[in-house]
Amino acid sequence: MKKRSINILLPTIICFTLITGCTKLKDKSYTDIVAEQFIPTSDDVAALLGTSYGSWRAVLNLNRTYWTIQEETTDAFLKACKANMSFCEEIHTFAHFHTWKTDEAAFADIWRTAFEGVTNCNRVLFQIESGEIPLEDDAKVVLVSELRTLRASYYYVLCDVFGNVPIVDRYDVPAGFLPEQNTRLEVFNFMVKEITESLPNLSDERNTTTYGRFNNKWSANALLAKIYLNAEVWAGTPEWEKCIAACDAIINSTLFSLEPIQANCFKLQNENSVENIWMIPYGGQKYGFRSNVHIYALPAEAQQVYDLQVPGWGGLVAIPQFIDTYDPDDKRLTGGAWLRGQLISSSGETIYVSRGDSVGKPFNIVNTVPSITHSEDMHGYRPIKYEVAKGEHPGYMENDAPMARYAEILMMKAESLMRLGRPGAGALVTEVRMRNFDDPAKATVTDEQLLETSTYDYGLRDTYPGSPYYGTTHETEPILYGRFLDELGWEFAGEAHRRTDMIRFGVYNTRSRLSFKATGQTHTDLGPIPLREMNTNSNLKQNPGYN
């Protein structure tokens, strides 16, 4: 009989060492394992799945990818030009102004890495179904269900960002295959079908064997709830009841709860958090799992605070109008999620500004950004929600990334109840708020208050006279459910939520902030199909509004 080889690349095994360790597979080849010599056990499954899961790290946050689009295009963050002239180029300002073109690298990278994830899932599914990966019947059913759900998670990103993308659900395609483009509704229905058909076969457990994987009902239901939450935008019909049902499956399991301190969800070793559900495991510089949020955010002088191997670049800052929405007693503002105030070195010394017009002054980070075109290094709070590893390279992330926390489950159920006009949203939001205030009265919010408009003072706030975007305006038209949108911003700042939330609440392109003057042109709710994909697949049609 002809020997068939199974591609199991070494990075696959390395990636999942963090979760389960790996079984050494002895063979003369380091990249191929002969099928007749390989009968996988439960210990081998994580290694087999490694590349299928590994694409998520690149999708989420490698250079300008999903995190960039989800946060820097919104009212929460931007990359501002600093004294060292970093972040002044168009490639760093496109996000704030929504001026991206079809060749913008961020969208090209999201498309590429997400479809790499889809292809990796399809490959292993093909190897299982063809018998190249021999499994017992029960194990086969479970693994196929896990991979179908994981594949749906990549389509979650593709549906969110691009809408109309090809559904590719097989690996054995003919040479020169060009997939047909599907509608956003078809992609939505595909994701729901994949998850709902897989759910009965997934585990009820929550332990080390389910961590960072879709082999359990809880990660799958969290993903399903997120899809249903956006059904009205993505599919044209709201699915609030189904979102509630997916959330209730997790709530009623009693396997998850809120951390007493939100920061526990983002510690360097956060794998034991009682709150985190769907996780993207990272492993720091040792394993090469790079995340650029810290290196973009931390100013060069912060190297002395954390004893970092290299300095940060410092341009990623919070938009002051967003910071101003926080209650000053909210621990999500004061509890360490933001680098602000006077910088002090690890040895206890005052740090001073080393460049720009403020050189020689104490490095005191303030909630001011004059313009996207001009700001000093000390302008703008820096996001450090994920604990910074001291003595490490700031571009490599030790913390695992929560894609769904128990707080989000409560908030998704609350939003669904609110939009259905049913009681209970205020109690759920209050439950999330309680850990963030010493005064219970400040933590309490009612159903009626969630219906109020946003506290965000929208409008232009470009105060640098030389800026082409100079001006101050105030946009006071009420926002339906605006207070709830505020709650989402306070709880999930920097977690790759904000763009999707703003679109769902209808304010992504209709409200100005800092140097961005809203146009109301909603075509940028969807990103462009990348130019290189359009050039290689004649079956693709560009999203409206892009040339």
Image: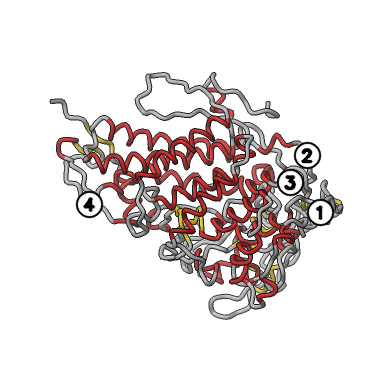
Q: Which residue is disc 2 drawn over?
A: 520
Q: In the drawing, what numbered circle is on residue 507?
A: 3
Picture quarter with the C terminus: top right
Tell us which disc is closer to us: 1 or 3.
3
> Quick check: 515 above or below 491?
above
Q: In the drawing, what numbered circle is on residue 462?
A: 1
Residue 236: percent from the left, percent from the top? Answer: 64, 35
Q: Residues within 10 Å of mark 3 (few under 14, many from 20)?
A: many
Tell us which disc is closer to us: 4 or 2.
2
Q: Residues within 10 Å of mark 4 (few under 14, many from 20)?
A: some
Q: Amino acid at mark 1?
A: Asp
Q: Which residue is disc 4 drawn over?
A: 23
> Quick check: 208 above or below 442?
above
Q: Residues within 10 Å of mark 1 (few under 14, many from 20)?
A: many
Please tell me whether mark 2 sits on a helix, a strand or a loop: loop
The span from disc 3 to disc 4 (Cα, nearest Å) is: 50 Å
